[in-house]
Image: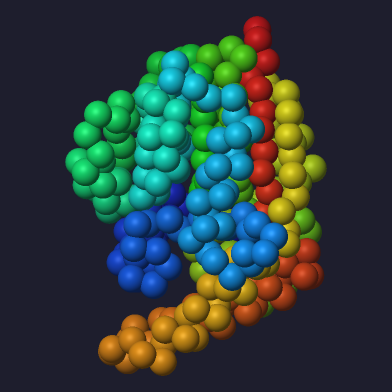
Amino acid sequence: MASRDYSERDVEEFFDQTLQNYLSFWDSDGVLHTGYFAAGNEGDYQAAAQHTSAVLAAEMMIDGSSRVLDAGSGCGNFLLYLAREYGCSGEGLDLSEKRVKFAMDRLTAAPGLRITFRHGSVTNMPYQAGAFTHVVSQDSLCLVPDKPRSHAEIARVLAPGGIFAFSDFLQPKEHVSERARRHVFDRVRWNGGYSLIGYQEALDSCGFEILLARNLRSHIRQTYRVLGETAVERAKTVPGQSARDWMLSFAESCREMQVAIDDEEFGWGIFVARKRSA
């Protein structure tokens, strides 16, 4: 993995500070992750983002008896989706206090769901060993500076035989260009990540059996193509120069992200793993 010096505090501050920008542009419900595009519907980001949740859920063997931890739960959408669709219970844990508050506010409009959200780090989780049947995550674990520790914590809080199902950004090449560093990694305070094979090796080393590892490079490229085009169009009509500047800067980064994807400096994958029994 490439290395940078961003800390968990840096990540927390960035996502607290940028929440309103992303809500106003990306998705007002706080769906801020990569889309899984269906054939014939390549231009609809919202539908693709919802499809990502459906694809992950279909692979993770979940039902109403499941107790789920969303590690890096952001604005809470994935856990809310799982609770509504499958009746599971669980918690979301996230570094960003503002995103946790946003998720809790959304939960008040969904009475009867057996879930909650908490502010905290996946490197030091406030749960007993074996507390969850499933751990899930969408595009957030890459941001953890100490990834081996977060994987060990996830293994600790999963019951034996429990399922770890997640999507995450990938770094296929060990070394990346300064362009990719600026527009991809530094933009979200990302130190560096694993290749598809490297991720599987890391999970295997801390007690997981790999059930699924899928490279979704074309979907992340399409995500940033659609979002970049949307940013350019919205910049034409949005009031305020600062908002226009932000959207145009984001659009530029989206173009550079597509270059980084083509150069195999940036990618995306979905993984499902089972915790081995002792």
Do we see residue 135 in this rendering? yes
- Residue 107: image location, x then y, percent: 26, 41
Do we see residue 145 in this rendering? no
Question: Which quadrant: the C terminus?
Answer: top right
- Residue 16: image location, x then y, percent: 32, 58
Name the residue nearer the viewer: 69 or 7: 69
Determine whether 27 is above or below 245 in the image.
above
Residue visible at 55% across and 42% down in the picture:
54
- Residue 31: image location, x then y, percent: 43, 56
| Residue 199: quarter of image | top right
Residue visible at 55% across and 78% down in the picture:
228
Residue visible at 72% across and 67% down in the picture:
261
| Residue 80: quarter of image | top left
Is 200 on the left-hand or right-hand side of 104? Answer: right
Is 200 on the left-hand or right-hand side of 181? Answer: right
The residue sitting at the front extreme is 40
Is 191 on the left-hand or right-hand side of 212? Answer: left
Q: How is the image coloured?
A: rainbow
| Residue 190: quarter of image | bottom right
Determine whether 229 is above or below 21 in the image.
below
Determine whether 114 is above or below 201 in the image.
above
